[in-house]
Amino acid sequence: MRFTTSVIALAAAASTSALNVFRTDGQSAILGDLLDVPGENPLRYCDADRGDDIINIEKVTLTPNPPEAGTTLVIEATGTVKEDIVDGAYVLLQVKYGYIRLINTQADLCKEMKNVDLDCPIKKGKITITKSVDLPKEIPPGKYTVLADVFNKNDDHITCLTATVFFGPKKGLTGGLLGDL
C-alpha cells in the first residue's frame, strides 16, 4: 500500500492545461478553471458537477510542485466533510504509465486513510491533512495518470480526482536516455 500512497501522491503533482468549452448561451467558459482543485497543485476534479459530493476540497498544496524523484513530497489539504465517512467506503483507483495500465483496483478507503494518519469514521466537519511521502529515486521517466473515484458504503459519491505527472530522465544523463549507457 506504500506504493499506492506514493502513486496517489505523485498524481497530485500533475501539470494540466485548461479546456475551452462553449456554453449554450454563446459565452465561452474555461472548464479547466472549474475542474482545477484550489491551491498549488495540478489536481483536477473528474467533472464540474460536484454538488452531491460528500467532501468539499478547499485547498491542496504540494511541496515541491511538481514533485521530483528522490525527494520528499509534502501534501497539505483542507476541506469540509458533509457527512460522516464510515467503514465500507471505497476508492476505485486507476494508475497508467503512458497508455499502460499499472493499477486498476478497488481499495478500502478506511484502510488507505491510515496512510495519512486518519481513522474511520471521519466525522462531519472541517478537516486538515498534512502528509510527507518519500518518492523513490527509481521512478522511470514518463507520464503517469491517476484517477481516484471515491464512494461511501452506500455508493454515494465522496469525490473524484485525476492528475497527470511527468517525470523526466534521470539527472546525470547528458546524452539522452541511452547516450551515457
Image: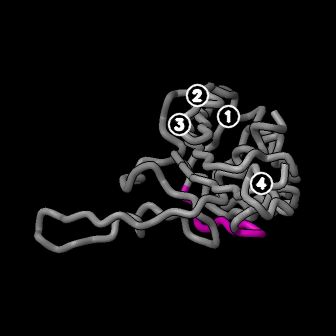
Vertical order, 69 against 98 (above or below): below
Measured Cα–Cα span from mark 4 to mark 2? 52 Å
Measured Cα–Cα span from mark 1 to mark 3? 34 Å
Q: Which residues are magenta?
A: 56-65
Q: Which of label 1 and label 4 is nearer to you?
A: 4
Q: Which of marks 3 and 2 precedes in the sequence? A: 3
How many numbered discs, if any?
A: 4
Residue type, numbered disc 1: Val
Q: Which of marks 2 and 1 precedes in the sequence? A: 1
Q: Which residue is mark 3?
A: 99
- CB under 8 Å between callouts 2 and 3? no
Which numbered disc covers residue 86? 1
**Residue 142, percent from left and from top:** 65, 49
Does the magenta run of residues contain 64? yes
Crowd rating for badge 3 (residues with CA inside 10 Å; few <14, some 14–19, many 20+): few
- CB under 8 Å between callouts 4 and 2? no
Q: Farthest residue in the left direction?
A: 25
Measured Cα–Cα span from mark 3 to mark 4? 25 Å
Q: Which residue is mark 4?
A: 179
Work out whether residue 75 or residue 83 is closer to the camera in this orientation and state it: 75
- CB under 8 Å between callouts 1 and 2? yes
Residue at image position (61%, 49%) is 143
Q: Which residue is mark 2?
A: 153
Q: Which of marks 4 and 3 precedes in the sequence? A: 3
Mark 2 element type:
loop
Vertical order, 156 against 35 (above or below): above
Q: Which of marks 3 and 1 precedes in the sequence? A: 1
Residue at image position (73%, 34%) is 110
